[in-house]
Image: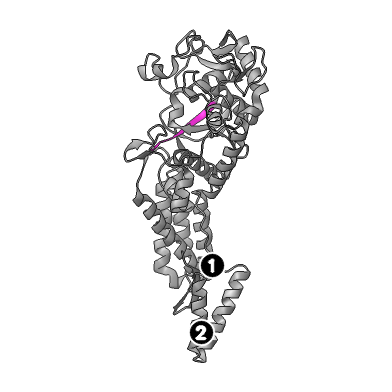
Amino acid sequence: MVLKVFNTLSRKKEIFTPLSKNEVKFYSCGQTVYDDLHIGNARTYSNWDIVTNYLRWKGYNVVHVQNFTDVGHLTDDADSGDDKIEKRAKERKINPYELVDSQIRKYYLDTDELNIKRANIMPRATCVIPEMIEMIKVLLEKGYAYIVGENVYFDTSKFKNYGQLAKLKLDEKSIKNRVCVDKNKKNCFDFALWLSAKKKDGKLHLMNWGSPWGKGYPGWHIECSVMAKKFLGNIIDIHAGGIDHIPVHHTNEIAQSEAANGVKFANYWLHSEFITIDGEKMSKSKGNFYTARELIDKYGAMNVRYVLSNSHYRKSIDFKEELFENAKNNLEKLNNVLIDLSQKNSFGKNDFNKEIKELINEFTIAMDDDFNTSQAMKAIQEFVKKINKELDNLSKKGAIESIKIINELLGVLGLKLTTKTSDGDFDKIMKTMIKLRNELRKDKNYKMSDLIRDELGKLNIELKDDKEGTKWFVKK
């Protein structure tokens, strides 16, 4: 079995072959930290977390870099308008750096709760300003950039394959409307590498740095090119982001990186689809969006993560209430089978070797097909059905190995269940309580045995008596 990924650059699935045999260099575009994490962002980061998990599960050493944009992302793609962070900071009457620190803390709280693991390196754009200035100097020296006043622009007419990623026709009206406002540009699709900090009223942007061209700040696109190069090198294996990055941001990253470095920038480009609300694209301007925190508080973090994980990254999700009900029901089924396995105290002879091998095979086939998470989840659910049918016949080894593989594969999909197992002091206490209750029942002291059951019930602990004995579990 070989891993195939859909490469946006070629518009087809390709066999994944990393630059180094056992190492993957992976860069994904991160959060512009001017606002809370919305669920569309969370879905994208969930997708790249799963990609990283699966590659590591297959034995690759993955170095994942995901940035924070804390300067230079303007309110439109035309290199005009306000910096999103400065604008929001002004609205809240706080310093931009204070806003950034606050939003990054919130980002980590939300993503940690959703079990989206942190990338190996998560740099802020403002930490690599000197490297950005150096790359801009290289582009000027090579003739790919030009200076107008205190601004520096990339000359797209000098880059032969500009627009290849997006399959752009450079006269497309929809794209022109986004990028053709700045009259300083020689060509409509040229983009800013460095912008003057001087505003129209003569004041300076609060976030500014000295440069050979005057006080200013970097353009959004140069930031990712520099951070990818600094932490991963000139050529990377995978570059990922949302589909909205294709026509402008990623197209510009390719142009400036390849012009400056003289080599191909990234071998595989992965892009995550949007979330829609009642069939419409989620948008802050329309007011039809949810923050990740809103949904975590309403439905629970793992239910939200299940919804994000149980759909192919290139397929749009239309958010509806039933998605979360379905997530809750499926996670309860998974949780219940783990409870049954962990508290099983009589065993048969079935080691479940064949079924476990089949699960691993089906899971791998699904994930090797461009990270098909919905099929991978289906393989786990079918395995659970087999366990429920064979529960009485499972050997101790079969039970232990089944628990292990379910948790392992759910972990690849970013799901973490909180089932109590037979480990720890609390479980020892419960065994003692159950033993005492059974002895009281044997002595026909039902009043005291029922009291133990009722008091545990007040603590949300339920006892279940069956032919195998008494089991306990924490109620939802």
Q: CA distance from mark 2 to mark 1?
A: 33 Å
**In the image, 286: left or right of 45?**
left
Three-letter amino acid code of the residue under disc 1: Lys
Nearer to me, 359 or 469: 469
- On the image, the x and y values in percent for residue 172 come to 36, 16
Q: Which residue is mark 1?
A: 397
Nearer to me, 300 or 75: 75
Label 2: few (<14), some or many (≥20) within 10 Å?
Answer: many
Q: Which residues are magenta?
A: 266-275
Query: Which dot, 2 or 1, sits closer to the camera?
Result: 2
What residue is shown at x 40% (from left), y 14% (from top)? 170
Q: Which residue is mark 2?
A: 449
Residue at disc 2, secondary structure: helix
- On the image, the x and y values in percent for residue 222 come to 57, 22
- On the image, the x and y values in percent for residue 174 come to 37, 20
What residue is shown at x 66% (from left), y 15% (from top)? 211
Label 1: few (<14), some or many (≥20) within 10 Å?
Answer: some
Q: Residue furthest left?
A: 279
What residue is shown at x 59% (from left), y 79% (from top)? 432
What residue is shown at x 48% (from left), y 41% (from top)? 42
